[in-house]
Amino acid sequence: MTKVIISKDKNGSYKQLTCNGHAGFAEAGSDVVCAAVSVLVINTINSLEELAGESFDVATDETEGFINCDFKGPLQEKSIFLLDSLVFGLKNIQKEYGAKYLQVKFKEV
């Protein structure tokens, strides 16, 4: 199962994004859930860097299906929109394929 944890502060500002694990929907190389989650998460992080110019620290482990993104400061409005879009996409994948394969959770930090 893939777990995505979106951390926000008490004001609702994004602070961290963590994605961990492989979905297990199908065999490696054929897992559409894992592929969809990966594309959404990686594209969002790349967009935050290249299109929005945000600063953050990223740690990854491809074997474990792990990516962690710590945002360094307040995010721009366009960056918040990108992250809201990511959450929207992830929730739709979870709804379509089930929490057995993808869990999206929020945490206050």
Image: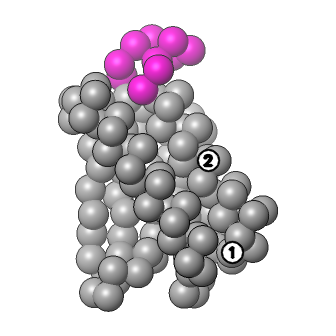
Occupied quadrant, residue 15: bottom left
Name the magenta segment's main secondary structure.
Answer: loop
Numbered mark located on residue 54 in the image: 1
Picture layout, residue 55 above or below residue 59: below
Quarter of the image that includes the N terminus: top left
- Horizontal side, residue 73 vs residue 3: left or right: right
**Which residue position holds label 2?**
42
Quarter of the image that includes the C terminus: bottom left
Picture layout, residue 23 above or below residue 44: above
Picture layout, residue 58 above or below residue 61: below
Occupied quadrant, residue 92: top left
Report the residue at 61% width, 47% height from top: 42
The question of residue 29 being in magenta is answered with yes
Report the residue at 46% width, 18% height from top: 31
Looking at this view, name the residue that lies furthest to the left: 99
Q: Alpha-carbon neighbours of circle 1 within 10 Å: few (<14), some, or many (≥20)? A: some
The Cα atoms of the two marked residues, 2 and 1, are separated by: 14 Å
> Upstream in the sequence, badge 2 or badge 1?
2
Counting from the top left corner in percent of width and height, residue 55 is at 69, 77
Q: Which residues are magenta?
A: 24-33
